[in-house]
Amino acid sequence: MFTVATIRTHAGRTYAAIQRQPGWLTRLAAGAIVLTLVAVALIILIPVIVIILALLALNFVARTIRGLFTGATAPNGPLDGRKNVRVRTSTDP
């Protein structure tokens, strides 16, 4: 905050009045700076967020496709490659 001292005369007395509130020009400049910083941040962040979301979607698709193929080669699956073999699980007697 800026401090501005002005000399005022009231009822025959002269005193220094200290005004601690910024003027309209200072508020306008501060608002323009904040607006510029927000715009620059959005210009940088929006493409980064889009790229991250695209990578996450690509990862999901890759894992789904890999799951389809690895599920087919699971024990006793259709592409297991073994004949007349039964895999015993821990719950089998």
Image (tube, grey):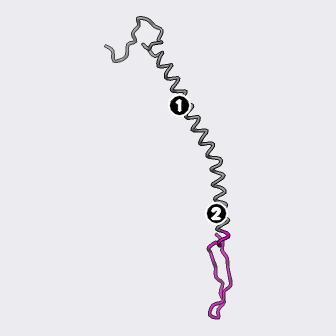
Q: Which residues are magenta?
A: 1-26
Please state which of residues 63 and 90 is positioned toward the viewer in this rendering.
Answer: 63
Q: Few, some or many C-alpha atoms within 10 Å of disc 1 (few <14, some 14-19, many ≥20)? A: few
Vertically, is 8 above or below 82? below
Question: Left or right of 60: which side holds 31?
Answer: right
Please state which of residues 48 and 15 is positioned toward the viewer in this rendering.
Answer: 48
Specify the quadrant that holds the C terminus: top left
Q: Amino acid at mark 1?
A: Phe
Residue highlighted by disc 2: 31
Question: Residue at position x 52%, y 24% from top?
Answer: 65
Extreme residue in the bottom direction: 12
**Residue 70 screen position, x and y as percent:** 50, 19
Residue highlighted by disc 1: 60
Please state which of residues 21 and 28 is positioned toward the viewer in this rendering.
Answer: 28
Question: Residue at position x 63%, y 77% from top?
Answer: 19
Cα–Cα gap, marks 2 and 1: 42 Å
- Who comes first in sequence, dot 2 or dot 1? 2
Question: Residue at position x 56%, y 35% from top?
Answer: 56
Q: Which mark is residue 10?
A: none
Question: Left or right of 61: which side holds 27?
Answer: right
Q: Few, some or many C-alpha atoms within 10 Å of disc 2 (few <14, some 14-19, many ≥20)? A: few
The magenta stretch spans residue 50 = no
The magenta stretch spans residue 11 = yes
Question: Residue at position x 66%, y 84% from top?
Answer: 16
Snapshot quadrant of residue 33: bottom right
Extreme residue in the left direction: 93
Vertically, is 59 above or below 80? below
Q: Amino acid at mark 2?
A: Gly
**Residue 6 screen position, x and y as percent:** 68, 81
Snapshot quadrant of residue 48: top right
Label 2 residue SS? helix
